[in-house]
Amino acid sequence: MTLRIMHVVNNLGKGGLENGVVNLINAMDAARFEHVVCTIRGLGGNADRLPQDRVQVVDLAGDGAHTRLQMPSLVRVMRRVKPDVVHSRNWGAIEAVLAARCARVGGVVHSEHGLERSAAAREPRRRSWVRRLAYELADRVLAVSDELRLLCAERTGYPAKKIQVIHNGVDRGRFAPDPECRARIRREFGIGNDDFCVGSVANLLPVKDHMTLLEAVNRLPQTIPWRLILAGDGSERATLERFVDERTALRGRVTFLGSTDRVPEILQAFDAFVLASLSEGICNALLEAMSTGLCVIATDVGGNPEIVVHERSGLLFPVRDVERLTAHLQHLAEDATLRQTLGDGALRRVRDSFSMDSMVRAYEALYEGLRSHSRLPALSAG
């Protein structure tokens, strides 16, 4: 008998959370699990990656539910779909926990995959209260990193020991070194054999802090033939493009790709991958870069130090430390042997600790464990 899982997310855009949900669904045993994905505020590019023949997608925004409070619509969907387990993710879908209790769903999971702002920023008190309520009502609370687990506990007062950590995994079939693809993509982008190509794959949002990366490459010595490729789109794009246009050293060297479905190919062109985020859970793009065999540079925040072992599988630097990032980039640009050593270390790190198989097994065990879970008292739907 299959177990029906209803995944509730804010949307299915190009973010790491959404990518991770689709990866998980596609990798789980179809003979044991069936899936319904409910989006609260629209679909997005990752929706196309779901197999339509075996995954039902419900879009509340497309169904005309445009109110700020989505719980009544969620209750109706759950009563119609009759899931065995509801799994909501992040603040944008947190109403699904209360809705699942109203709909008398047997198993309820809520997971946190990252922060909408810097870890140092104070969260509104009302939001912390709602998170705490959701954690108390859920059967299982998850986080994708140990650091995020501790931060959620600190902000809500919910016991950290009751939050389970399941690290993200990377599909090593899609993301692996490919010398032929590397040569082809570098030719396509006009990147010379001696050019030092730096890249980043992340939504262009304030929390990703691309400005620090731009300021760092702007400080590189003119003797270094560097290129920068930024894959992703978002609210900061105009500001970043203006910064580039206003600086002679950056013009013609920085490429804004926007949102792209070619990430596995684009990564092949890089010599180094940079993640300058102000906060992170476990970053899928970072894992994908490491699985591609790239040396990576990441901020020493969130789940990044759980992935990157400094000077063994990559390099770390403090948030907004332009000087340190510049030094890392210059060192890598001038030392191809170090790039290879760190890239090899990154490959081993992903293989040993962040495989897709280990992540999928953990989620399958979690869902199976809730199959016969006794229900909490259901709340009135009004």
Image (spheres, grey):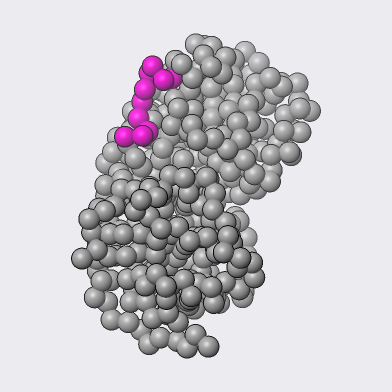
Farthest residue, direction top: 193
Residue 124 vs residue 38, the one in the foreground: 38
Magenta region: which residues? 173-182
Q: Is residue 381 visible?
A: yes
Q: Main secondary structure of the magenta part?
A: loop
**Side (left or right) of 34 relative to 210:** left
Q: Residue at x 40, y 40 (%)?
A: 287
Q: Residue at x 64, y 70 (%)?
A: 67
Residue 102 vs residue 148, the one in the foreground: 102
Q: Residue at x 50, y 39 (%)?
A: 298
Say if 24 sits above or below 179 in the image.
below
Q: Is residue 134 visible?
A: no
Total count of labels: 0
**Side (left or right) of 328 relative to 167:** right
Say if 374 sits above or below 14 in the image.
below
Quick one: quadrant of the N terminus? bottom left
Say if 300 sits above or below 245 in the image.
below
Residue 74 in percent (x, y) is at 50, 72
**Side (left or right) of 215 relative to 371:** right
Residue 231 in percent (x, y) is at 57, 34
Among the 4 quarters of the image, the one containing residue 308: top left
Q: Residue at x 50, y 56 (%)?
A: 114
Residue 168 vs residue 265, the one in the foreground: 265
Residue 225 in percent (x, y) is at 59, 15
Say if 303 sits above or below 308 in the image.
below
